Amino acid sequence: MRRRVLFVLPDVNCARKMMDDLLLARIEERHIHFIANQDVSMAGLHEGNLLQKSDLVHGAQLGMLIGAGLGAATGVAIAVASHTTDGTPLVIVLIATVLGSLLGAWISSMVGSSVPNSRLRPYQRAIDEGKILLMVDVPHHRVDEIRDRLHAIHPEAEDRGLDPHVPAFP
């Protein structure tokens, strides 16, 4: 299990040094993500991808929930209209629920991929000012060690704590 540690860095040079220090601490590059505004050159940094920058995951979750509800309601309506007494109404409701869930997740994730990540809203002002947000996914047992190390080496970096949402990906 991993925890996401967040830092706001003043400039690109600090971000590059921070990345080097995290690599020396044996944090894999795929677990280090930097997000900055479009004016900042991210050369040499592992930039956050679509999952970190957009609301794709939140959109998919919300769409799956709404789609499942609408699919179940549609399935119930079809089952009631079919007037059968064998087991097919239950199958119809289950199939409609699954299809609604999948369709809702697909449509909402497409919309969510074009919307900025709502979890980054507290850091948007710093990003707009030209600062860089560092998100590093650290094994749970190493969180204190990594935070203490970064505080000691980089006093200029603002520690923004831990993300309350644990990333589901490795």
Image (cartoon, rainbow, N blue to C red):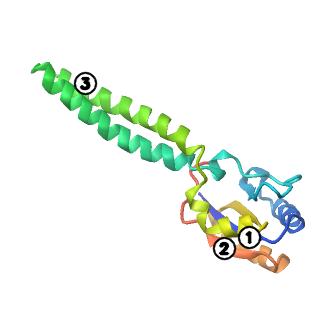
Q: Considering the numbered disc 1 on the image, is that residue within a helix, a strand or a loop? A: strand
Residue named by callout 2: 160
- Residue type indicated by callout 1: Val
- Residue type indicated by callout 3: Ile
Q: Earlier in the sequence, mark 1 or mark 2?
A: 1
Residue named by callout 3: 92
Q: Is residue 153 visible?
A: yes
Residue 77, above or below 133:
above
Residue shown at 87% from the left, 62% from the top: 16
Side of 44 relative to 116 (left or right): right
Where residue 17 appears, as percent x and y from the top left, is 88, 66
- Looking at the picture, tell me which residue is in the foreground, 52 or 23: 52
- Looking at the picture, tell me which residue is in the foreground, 128 or 45: 128
Label 2: how many Cα within 10 Å (few below 14, some 14–19, many 20+): some
Q: CA distance from mark 2 to mark 3?
A: 49 Å
Label 3: how many Cα within 10 Å (few below 14, some 14–19, many 20+): some
Which disc, if any, is residue 8? 1
Residue 9, above or below 70:
below
Where residue 161 appears, as percent x and y from the top left, is 64, 73
Q: CA distance from mark 3 to mark 1?
A: 51 Å
Residue shown at 79% from the left, 73% from the top: 150
- Contact between marks 1 and 2 (CB within 8 A): the answer is yes
Q: Earlier in the sequence, mark 3 or mark 1?
A: 1
- Residue type indicated by callout 2: Arg
Residue 167 picture quarter:
bottom right
Residue 157 picture quarter:
bottom right
Residue 102 picture quarter:
top left
Q: Considering the numbered disc 3 on the image, is that residue within a helix, a strand or a loop? A: helix
Tell me the quadrant of the picture where the N terminus can be found. Answer: bottom right
Where residue 140 appears, as percent x and y from the top left, is 62, 64
